[in-house]
Amino acid sequence: MMRIIIIGAGVIGTAIARELSRYEIDIVLLEKTADVANGTSKANSGIIHAGYNADFDTLKGKLNVKSNPVFDKLCADLKVPFKRIGSYVVGFNEQDLKELKKKKENGEKNGLDDLEIIGQKQLISQEPNINKKAKYALYAPGAAIISPYELTIAYANNAVINGVQLLLNTEVNDLISDDGQIKGVKTNQGEIKGDFVINAAGLYSDKIARMAEDNFKIKPRKGEYHLFDKEYGDLVNHILFPMPTKKSKGILVLPTVHGNILIGPNANTIDDKDDLSTTSKGLNKVLNGAKRLIPEIPEKGVITSFSGLRAALSSEDFHIDFSENLVGLINIIGIQSPGLSSAPAISDMVVEMFKNYSLRENYELQLKKDFKEKNSKLPHYYEYEDKGKLDDWQKIVEKHEDYGEIICRCEHVSRGEIIDAINAPVPAQTIDAIKRRTRASSGRCQAGFCGPRILQILADQLNIDPLEVSKKGSGSQILRARSKQLILEKIKEDKRAGDQ
């Protein structure tokens, strides 16, 4: 059986893994960190773009428009929260109006027939808290919001259910080839043989490509964000964009699928692909930019701030093509916005490329007869609470008492939900992994109450010492030592000092 190796378990790598798992192929998905969705896929705006922004003659534009209608069924199948709430690009003057008309025209060239430019009165009726100086807006009803990391996790779970082997903490150090043909990869865990390699390594996709002497250069573009408490979740009803620039869609304001408000990002090109720091200067710029759209944004409402990195190529377009130097390697590079929005179409494109390759190699692909299209729906207390179905939740508690203990008070997450996450097809084995799957520690106290309890549940379920539990993998352990041990160390230290 042919073996495919996919490098990178972000939204693109997991989407491809899931689509390829429809076929009778041996698929190995490699991720260098301790969980999927640990790169760009965990820290972005979570928008499914309508498709008017990227130029109609770019790969970005084509794949975005192709993907957008797919998300309703995809998210229903994978059990991912998704809301089509529409977006507005907000203009303040006549020059802005001219640019909005250009965006509308570009969207129509992309095939969108539902775009509309509206005036001030209609905009204010839809967004009562909008800056009253705003005069125009381009309305795109097809825009939507999603949880990017939950989509990635759901893709990964479905891929694993359908036979994909996921190897975490497995970093690719080199490619293996013979006479110009890919033969596998060298990793920190040893060699993995394979007949075909898909490079979906995100920020590090250029590094993987250079192993095949394909010359690409990713320049990371950092974006900083503020996330607001759910108390302010009704400040906006749609995704609000300012007028875009050549390198950014600007600092936006949007509701999240979980009821928060998110603002950002700014856009700064940096050199360090691991630099996720935030700065007071950058975050102030984000806040001031958001206030241009929503003047009453409350600074006191911020519960956390973070940054994400975009994998930008100088072309500002996606690169999806076979390697020029190694047969059996596909490079997927420069997948920045609208990469999340384009993930389904990117995966379809790569599958078609692989099909054409397999035909040339005289390998006959066969569809699985038992492919599982849908993920199982796990119970979440907040969903039952929001729908007023607590009597139904009580029935679940009577069968499984772990669902009766609320561990995270801010997000109303039960012990049972955390245990479900630890025992999922792609198991949560770190504090951050639990957070991404259950939202435990995502609320206003930011793990102040539930953090120690989550740590103990992880230790108990994984049968490890609490000292081994980490935030995001090796080197990020939460606890240094037991208090008794620290006291003994201090006594010994004081004794040594006294002897001297």
Image (spheres, helix red, strand yellow):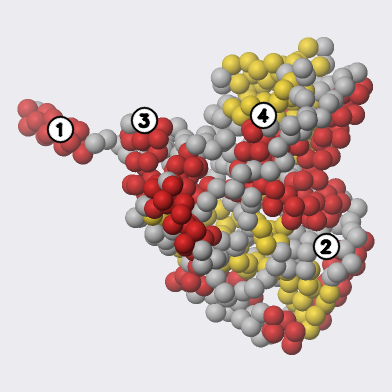
Q: Hey, what amino acid is under mark 3?
A: Ile
What whole-number distance in Å separates the C-alpha atoms at marks 2 and 3? 50 Å
Q: Nearer the viewer, residue 449 or 312?
A: 449
Q: Position of residue 345 (x, y in %)?
A: 81, 45
**Residue at x 83% of width, y 49% of height:** 63
Compare marks 1 and 3 and give the one earlier in the sequence: 3
Q: Position of residue 236 (x, y in %)?
A: 62, 74
Q: Nearer the viewer, residue 214 or 409?
A: 409
Compare marks 2 and 3 and give the one earlier in the sequence: 2
* Residue 70 higher or lower than 172, as above or below: below
Compare marks 4 and 2 and give the one earlier in the sequence: 2
What whole-number distance in Å separates the C-alpha atoms at marks 4 and 2? 35 Å
**Residue at x 33% of width, y 31% of height:** 465
User: Where residue 164 is drawn, which disc sits there?
Assistant: 4
User: Where residue 488 is drawn, which disc sits there?
Assistant: 1
Compare marks 1 and 4 and give the one earlier in the sequence: 4
Q: Quadrant of residue 218?
A: top right
Q: Hey, what amino acid is under mark 4?
A: Val
**Quadrant occupied by the N terminus:** top right
User: Where residue 464 is drawn, which disc sits there?
Assistant: 3
Foreground label between 2 and 3: 3
* Residue 221 higher or lower than 197, as above or below: below
**Residue at x 69% of width, y 16% of height:** 193
**Residue at x 91% of width, y 60% of height:** 111
Q: Hey, what amino acid is under mark 2?
A: Tyr
What whole-number distance in Å separates the C-alpha atoms at marks 4 and 3? 27 Å
User: Where residue 52 is drawn, which disc sits there?
Assistant: 2
Asked if marks 1 and 3 touch (Cβ < 8 Å), the reply is no
